[in-house]
Amino acid sequence: MLRLGRDNCPAVDPISFRQRTAWALLVASILTSLCAPDSYAQRSLFGSVDDPEEQSNVAWWESYSEFQTAGGFSLIGPQWRTAGLLEWSSYRTNTSFRLSSTFRAGLYGAYEPDSDELYDLLRVVEFARYRPARGGAYVRIGPLDRARLGNGYLVNFLSTEASWDERTLGLEARFEGRYVALETISADISRAGLIGARLSLSPFRKNSSNLHALTLGVSMMQDRDVTLDNGDRFRGVEFDVRYVAFNNGGFDFIPFASFGQLKGFGQGILIGADLENDNFIDLARVHMRLALQYNSSDFLPGYFGSFYGVSNMQSRILENQNGPPVDVALRDVQRGKSVNTELRVLVFERFEFWYAFMRYHGVQKLSEYHLRLFFRTPRFTLAVGQDRRGLKGLLSLLGELGEENRMRFEFAYRVFSSFWVQFDAHYTYLRVTDTGDSKGYSIQRRFDPLMGLRVRF
């Protein structure tokens, strides 16, 4: 366990009067808005619930299973190896799953991280999910890569794949009733380490007044592997309010606000609005966001995010195997503000574009960028995912990638009949130092070109 105290550390800055006033004004404006229809309340932004690569809710006559076997080469770091792939996937009306395993061997023997521990048997599961067509429930087991709670102020694009050889099977689950919804996530189904939940309440949903579109929520995320000096677990809490101010042409305009705090560290507020259409002409789902964040010192928005597995209280990202840390420790984060922009367009089961950028205004390079792109046709499949930190402005995306960068590029092409070729390029992290309570990670590059057969039945 890592124990953290506040002795000899800078005090947490209180929220200023201006920030409190902004919070109060937003809440007041929400409660006095007019013309409020019902809302989907961000159901589609909870984890992988509608990830087109993991499609479920297919019609019964379109259900299918697919088996794939492929072979080729694998480049991990400086060394080439031969590689073999076995994969089985299934898509049904209420369920879907994919099991996949890759075996690598070279001049120096097998690649040990593929099969050096019992947990590797669990890593065969890429995803297994249950989502009834009538809605109301959703359960998914598999590595997390886009987990979010509430407005994403604490938990945003949480991933358990930051270090691919150490990836863990997480859990996402959502249960929704008439007035209450419960969302829960766990980074590892085998142990209670990093866990979180959000409880949301729509107390006036069946009321004829304007308050029927009001949703209140509270989220908590706890890392049970980190203990503070007073004996408490390290955790964060978020309180949020959302309200559908008006609807026009199927688009909901939803102002929202969140207050977040990391226990023993800092706090902040998030104020913004979403523009959403959950079913645009029976073809697509659209989500747009513009928001402002005001943060005290010792607080980082989306702290439980894409890099949490390698950049947290116990782990740091290193410049190289023997170099210094390049990420900013939570205790070193200074007061600042951010502008959030986000756009997601989902063409059901075919195409997804999800862009999110947090432009941090301060003396530190704390801006974050996230991209998810997926496109599928009968002939080819393309999937791109990228997460970057340590940025300044939007133009910094055009600069060097740096060490705070995760990226995966997957492409598969059907040459003829059941014969496919595919490429998987992956920027991930490798543990290079371990002193018990402190681990160091550096960039690891992987590339797997394969060819083989896919049989659908």
Image (cartoon, rainbow, N blue to C red):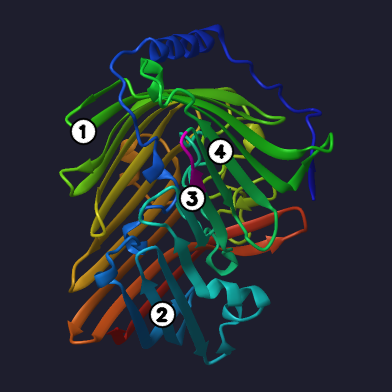
Question: Magenta segment range?
Answer: 174-178
The amino acid type of the residue labelled 2 equals: Trp
Q: Which marked residue is nearer to the observer: mark 2 or mark 3?
A: 2
Mark 4 = which residue?
198
Mark 1 = which residue?
250
Residue 66 in the image: above or below residue 38 = below
Q: Residues within 10 Å of mark 4 (few under 14, many from 20)?
A: many
Which is nearer the N-term, disc 4 or disc 2? 2
Mark 3 = which residue?
404
Find the distance from the CA under tag 4 to the CA under tag 1: 27 Å
Residue at 74% in and 46% down: 226
Q: Residues within 10 Å of mark 1 (few under 14, many from 20)?
A: few
The answer to the question of whether label 4 and label 2 lie on touching residues, with beta carbons closer than 8 A, is no
Q: Residues within 10 Å of mark 3 (few under 14, many from 20)?
A: many
Q: Position of residue 183 (x, y in %)?
A: 53, 44
Q: Is 236 in the magenta?
A: no
Q: Position of residue 171 (x, y in %)?
A: 56, 56
Residue at 46% in and 51% down: 137
Residue 158 seen in this snapshot = no
Mark 2 = which residue?
88
